[in-house]
């Protein structure tokens, strides 16, 4: 099946594609805000209608304990391989709204980029797959490969219900690889394929002091302030140089060979590039590692949010009753999130003074993942990039976590092909998130090429994952 | 002038007094919230109308740069001393509202106490003075002493505009003492007069990291997290034992004689009593001092609020752009708030790492104050308590700060007579603040007696304040 008619269709349809993506971005499908559940349902229904319209079969909105999964497939050729396309239609909150130039759920075209929460992460990238599928179906009436689409609504909260779905349907989900576009390129003209993802563990540390706020004049100096006790606990998570102090935290962290580290230094972003992307002047963290290494092969823990006492206008002379920190670990092979949760629990109970009490809640955890760069479905992605961008992809490690990568590997035994289309300055997770339109158009074309290139792959490539784990 | 007709009037009027106080408490006169300025104006107007109605002269609502001062006087006797009655009609915020059993600005009668923000601090106590004045004017047509009422609307934000008013009007405000009911009793049957107030200094420490939130997967471990840097700064304000670490912080702190400390141990609350009031099991703070001493003759710094990053529902994997802590120092003789502000500034710039930047804002400051226990206007208050409560007052130090005490001493050269009517469990500054009605009734009677007892004092008692400062 020649891809050129599909490519021409995609080029001719760009304007419409953007206006459809704009519709998709209007849903405030924030999975971490329970009051948005209706918006997530409406967004899923919109997406399902769209998949039906472009000609996919078996379109379903599958309920879960949380937000629904949008499922669709096209499996009409017996002699071609099957690919899973995974993406997520849920997004992070828009808050803090004051930092956005335009409202996060009013998609705005500016400097040839669509600005909205979820523009790059992940609605825009997911939509590139959808438009590539449409381009074939509307021109050829068929796809070069069999396709299963799994678009979930809970990625940003750790995909709590997806593993169950994948496990229960492992037979029906037989495929050679899962294609995921939810990562970044090196720059607008240098595509990248991610071959490593950090794992994660979220936790909330809540320190309780007096049962109610106290007057800080009457009691200040005599009653332990829970906000200050929390600060001590948080400050104590790192030593002065930026190493995590939790005993045993680094025990399972894999050390990489000099060869791998040199290869990372060649292919990955420089310290300068990372600082430029972050818009900060100086790096921070564990000594002995480049910034790229610190964000990929080294683990860390961040405070994502902290709250306690009077935070409104003006002053209120109180000792708060409690204070809360939301923290998240980023884990690397061979750290096990469950073991890290236990180490954290032990550490917190050791360092909590008797003058306060601590509630520790550990939430969603994600296993770190490595993907074979030599897997032919991964190599095909690099070729597809070359067709669309004129350059093959470089292979990079990613600091983030896509929970399902580990699930696809572990349950289905297939690699995730992480074809990213985000740009380093897309402000993923931050205010003014955007998706660059020229990249969107090339992303659709890359996917069109990928369908073509993947169509010649064997039905059931099962290259051993374990090989990669001992790189 | 015999006080019995006034006393009988007050007893007969109790029910009405409570219903008037309820009206007064309904104004959400929160001085720290600029959007409440209209409520403060309406509350001041209500109070002024009330003072006019009970028969005071020269009632004025005096505008300031902030909230107005309600002024009234009754100066019709040439041969009697003049007393200033000071109180404040502004209150702290009701937030966090979820911790209130009843809304803070819907006064609710429960267990013989009126529950509302400001019930004890200070509307209820201020109103005791007003009702005592009314009881004389409505029965005798006159007061036993001359009276100046100064009721301000900015006490809870550090009285930023009151000093200017007092200084500009120092001649017109000639008096022998300023009576302030804005402190606490030991218990419902043990009245207390405060002879020491801690000073204060408020500050906000804001740590800035990247110019926008960053993805904690992409950058965690390589970019300094401002919430974590803030935690280190806050944690570093105390050593492990609870002593403040800011160099020079204790340099000017006065050491008290064994005699004074023994007398404090006898008259002041025990550690157990303080823990019971705070509803905590264990004390905290500077070693070598009782809890009463830690909250009165020793200085401290508290975090009143802390905020940074994502604090809403669920998770958001970000490195915040900034984090903020609101802190307040409680200072003791002979600490100077301006010098402490400079020490803090020096300390913060010394401990801030180069990976983040800090904005330090120091706000309202209050000088610590000591009041002569032997001043006859103070002694008269103790006698008045004996008349109403059957027991003379004990003299205690207070951990809080009433900014105007130092102003009255410094500018007018007169002592503040701190006749407190709050109970230790009134939850001043906390949720479910209340004012116990039997105490309200006795407070009115105590004031009625005080008028009578003060009427025999000389016109211009000017006992040297300095004497007390070398106790």
Image (cartoon, coloured by chain):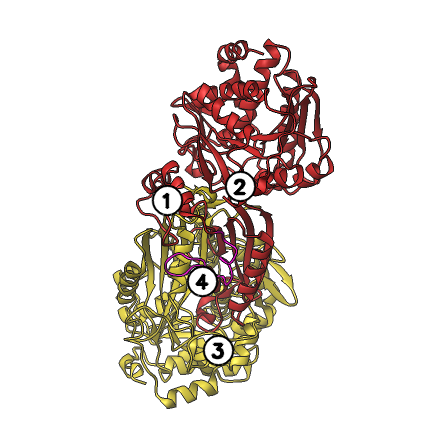
Chain colours: A red, B yellow
Q: What stretch is highlighted in magenta?
A: A237-254
Residue A150, picture quadrant: top right
Residue under pointer 2: A468
Is residue B170 placed above or below B103 in the rendered structure? below
Whether discs 1 and 4 lie on one chain: the answer is no
User: In the image, which is nearer the foreground, mark 4 or mark 3?
Assistant: 4
Residues at circles 4 and 3 in contact by the CB criterion of under 8 Å: no
Q: Distance between the residues labelled 4 and 3?
A: 57 Å
* Residue assigned mark 4: A236
State which quarter of the image contains the C terminus of chain B: bottom left
Q: Distance between the residues labelled 1 and 2?
A: 35 Å
Find the distance from the CA under tag 2 to the CA under tag 4.
35 Å
Q: Name the residue under label 1.
A: B210
Residue B404 in picture, x, y percent from top left:
35, 66
Question: Mainly helix, strand or loop, the magenta region?
Answer: loop
Q: In this view, does A141 lie above or below B344?
A: above
* Mark 4 secondary-structure assignment: loop
SS for dot 2: helix
The answer to which quarter of the image holds residue A404 is: top right
Image x and y of residue A133, in percent: 59, 18
Alpha-carbon span between mark 1 and mark 4: 22 Å
* Chain containing the residue with disc 2: A
Q: Does the magenta stretch include residue A247?
A: yes
- Tag shown at residue B449: 3
């Amino acid at each position: 099946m020649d891809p050129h008619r599909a490519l021409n269709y995609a080029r001719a349809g760009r304007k419409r594609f953007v206006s459809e993506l704009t519709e998709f971005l209007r849903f405030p499908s924030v999975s971490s805000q329970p009051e948005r559940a209706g918006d997530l349902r409406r967004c899923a229904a919109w997406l399902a209608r769209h998949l039906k319209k472009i000609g996919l079969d078996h379109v379903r909105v599958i309920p879960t304990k949380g937000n629904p999964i949008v499922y669709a497939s096209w499996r009409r050729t017996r002699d071609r391989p099957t690919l899973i396309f995974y993406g997520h239609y849920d997004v992070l909150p828009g808050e803090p709204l004051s930092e956005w130039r335009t409202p996060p759920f009013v998609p705005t075209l500016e400097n040839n980029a669509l600005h909205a929460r979820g523009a790059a992460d992940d609605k825009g990238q997911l939509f590139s797959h959808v438009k590539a599928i449409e381009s074939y179906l509307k021109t050829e009436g068929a796809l070069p490969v069999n396709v299963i689409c799994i678009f979930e609504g809970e990625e940003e909260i750790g995909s709590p219900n997806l593993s169950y779905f994948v496990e229960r349907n492992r037979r029906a989900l037989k495929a050679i690889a899962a294609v995921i576009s939810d990562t970044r390129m090196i720059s607008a003209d240098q595509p990248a394929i991610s071959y490593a993802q950090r794992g994660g563990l979220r936790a909330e540390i809540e320190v309780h002091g007096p049962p109610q706020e106290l007057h800080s004049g009457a009691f200040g100096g005599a009653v332990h302030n829970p906000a200050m006790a929390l600060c001590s606990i948080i400050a104590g998570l790192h030593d002065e140089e930026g190493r995590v102090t939790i005993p045993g935290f680094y025990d399972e962290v894999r050390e990489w060979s000099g060869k791998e580290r040199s290869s990372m230094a060649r292919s990955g972003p420089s310290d300068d590039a990372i600082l430029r992307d972050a818009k900060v002047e100086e790096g921070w963290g564990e000594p002995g590692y480049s910034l790229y290494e610190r964000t990929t092969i080294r683990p860390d823990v961040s405070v994502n949010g902290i709250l306690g006492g009077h935070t409104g206008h003006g002053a209120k002379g109180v000792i708060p009753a409690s204070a809360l920190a939301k923290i998240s670990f980023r884990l690397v092979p061979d750290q096990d999130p469950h073991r890290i949760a236990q180490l954290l629990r032990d550490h917190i109970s050791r360092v909590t003074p008797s003058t306060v009490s601590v509630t520790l809640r550990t939430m969603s955890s994600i296993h770190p993942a490595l993907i074979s760069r030599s897997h032919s479905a991964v190599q095909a992605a690099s070729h597809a990039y070359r067709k669309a961008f004129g350059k093959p992809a470089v292979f990079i490690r990613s600091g983030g976590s896509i929970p399902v990568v580990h699930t696809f590997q572990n349950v289905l035994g297939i690699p995730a092909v992480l074809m990213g289309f985000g740009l380093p300055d897309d402000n993923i997770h931050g205010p003014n998130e955007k998706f660059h339109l020229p990249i969107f158009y090339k992303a659709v074309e890359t996917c069109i090429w990928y369908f073509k290139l993947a169509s010649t792959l064997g039905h059931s490539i099962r290259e051993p994952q374990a090989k990669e784990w001992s790189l």
